[in-house]
């Protein structure tokens, strides 16, 4: 069973924060893994949209139940 890149690796690649020591292995993995390429493409679209967002729009904090769900999800991953 193939081990996929983790979310941190994919996020760093999407943000163009390559670690030279890992970039070769990650690139090699992406060449053979359609699942990770699809995940990376989706993250890159999010990064592109976020970078294109207008800074003049006010930031609105999410509802408390959203933060609760994020906290629960992160807690389960650690």
Image (tube, rainbow, N blue to C red):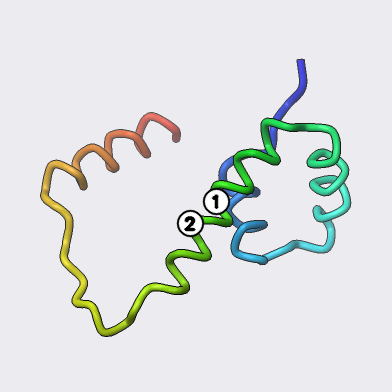
- Residue 73 in the image, given as x and y percentages of width and height: 34, 34
Residue hosting label 2: 46
Q: Which residue lies furthest to the bottom in this view?
A: 56
Looking at the picture, does residue 2 appear above or below residue 21? above
Q: Which of 52 and 23 is in front in this view?
A: 52
- Residue 15 in the image, given as x and y percentages of width and height: 60, 64
Q: Which of 60 and 8 is in front in this view?
A: 60
Q: Check disc 2: other Cα within 10 Å, few if <14, some if 14-19, many if 20+.
A: some
Which residue corresponds to the image point at 17% horizontal and 55% vertical from the top-left? 62
Judging from the image, what secondary structure is the residue with disc 2 in? helix
Give the side of residue 16 with respect to residue 64, left or right. Answer: right
Q: How many labels does the image show?
A: 2
- Residue 49 in the image, given as x and y percentages of width and height: 45, 64
Quarter of the image for residue 19 reads bottom right
Judging from the image, what secondary structure is the residue with disc 1 in? helix
Which residue corresponds to the image point at 88% horizontal and 43% vertical from the top-left? 28
Quarter of the image for residue 61 reads bottom left
Which residue corresponds to the image point at 85% horizontal and 40% vertical from the top-left? 31
Residue hosting label 1: 43
Do residues under tags 1 and 2 come within 8 Å of each other at their CB atoms? yes
Q: In which quarter of the image is the N terminus?
A: top right
Q: Quadrant of the C terminus?
A: top left
Give the side of residue 46 with respect to residue 54, left or right. Answer: right
Looking at the picture, does residue 16 appear above or below residue 63? below
């Amino acid at each position: 069973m193939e081990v996929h890149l983790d979310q941190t690796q994919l996020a760093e690649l999407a943000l163009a924060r390559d670690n030279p020591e890992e970039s070769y292995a990650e690139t090699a993995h992406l060449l053979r893994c359609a699942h990770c390429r699809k995940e990376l493409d989706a993250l890159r679209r999010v990064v592109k949209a976020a970078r294109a967002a207008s800074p003049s729009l006010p930031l609105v904090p999410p509802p408390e139940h959203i933060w609760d769900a994020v906290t629960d999800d992160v807690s389960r991953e650690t």
